[in-house]
Image (tube, grey):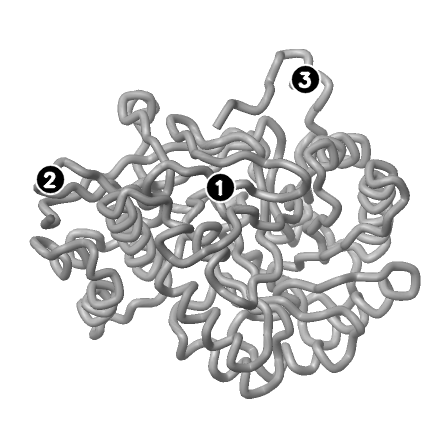
Amino acid sequence: MRITGYRTLTTVQEWARPVGDANGVFADGVTVLPIVLVDTDEGATGVGLGSHAGIADVFSAIDGEDPRSTAALYDRMLRSAFKAGHAGAVFGTIGALDTALWDLKAQFADEPLWRLLGGRDRVVPAYASGLDIGLGDEELAAAYGVYAGRGLRAAKLKGGLDVEADRRRLTLVRDVLADAGGGARPGLMLDANETWSRKQAVRHVRELERTLDLAWIEEPVRRWDAEGLAVVQRGVRAAVATGENLTGLEQFRPLLHAGAVDIVQTAAVHGVTHFLRVAALAHAHDLPVSPIGNVPVGLLHAATAVPNHLVSELQDLWPPVGVTADLDIEDGAFVLGDAPGLGLKVCEQAVADLGLRPGPPDPAGPGVRPARAGLRLHATETDPATDRSRTRPEPFETEAANAAGRVPADP
């Protein structure tokens, strides 16, 4: 089997409600998801979901190679980006291609990837993550009520701009999950998406911890600030989780050396090989790993094969437009299927009909950091005139969506 080419598509995730974080909100609830398809001379196609940035140059490192040489080809791609650097979007491109190679490798073996990687149990524990900062209280309760109906008993909320709003929202979701779970105490996490300074992070979390038990606080300060993350880690009861935006093992080393992280995270779009290596590094430090953003599903398969997997993020319950996955969500967990490879199928025509191409980030969305992020003196709301991150869309009418008949698609 030899790699003969690649194709790129761009689909969307339709949340049917506003989604975002402390940095901004997509009011229409539509997020873009690039797709990479890797073709072979035997007719098999591997699927990767992630960046297209610099793909022609990166692909040249694997063109004509046997896709089953996943580790060696991953390193070839890293070396191909040596001078310009493999960070940022280019690392996402490497991850998307790497995931497609793992898909091909498992297809060739006629096994699901979780089995090929040595996993014993196809069940991957999950927590709910609604990208929910744009929702009012009623919409928030309705959204997490849907997660609770699938057995989810842990939730990560977006926040960090108003400590009392965070307390109210966390308490509301706690009660929704507790009621669904017969009174069992749910797990609660808060994701600040790098919006705080060090001291602000400690003040904000300590204030929340007067009345709430937080399992972890995610990205309280900048992703690379090992000293700052360590300050937060020592200053609060909650665990510190971070790593989804780090690109390469070399970026994890300072954080581990400083004792700055309790939950080691990796982004699904950064690929299977990266996750396996980060998981091994974390395991050497007796730390758990937790994959983020699992629409690409590759890290769910990989999670079954590492000894220190804790829990994986479950975002939308519906697949992206034109994509189906061989998995279910039952009893608070992803349940992987038996289809060879990743179990992903892409309806290319449905995606092509969207007519989308990757473009610059929406300045009102969470992909652009606000000018005042990390510079606010207090963990409270700021003036919307000077900080766009406080602009909120009108609450989405969840009842209207339910009335329209939006139900989860069969996997």
Answer above or below: position of 21 versus 331.
below
Q: Earlier in the sequence, mark 3 or mark 2?
A: 2
**What SS does tag 3 mark?**
helix
Number of callouts: 3
192, 276: nearer the viewer:
276
Answer above or below: position of 86 versus 348.
below
Tell which tag, 3 or 2, sits nearer the viewer.
2
Image location (x, y in percent) of residue 229:
63, 77
State if disc 3 and disc 1 touch (CB < 8 Å). Answer: no
Image location (x, y in percent) of residue 217:
70, 64
Residue bearing the label numbered 2: 42
Q: Residue at x 73, y 49 (%)?
A: 154
Residue bearing the label numbered 3: 402
Three-letter residue code for mark 3 = Asn
Q: Earlier in the sequence, mark 1 or mark 2?
A: 2
Q: Earlier in the sequence, mark 1 or mark 3?
A: 1
Residue bearing the label numbered 1: 336
Three-letter residue code for mark 1 = Leu
| Left or right relative to 163: residue 52 | left
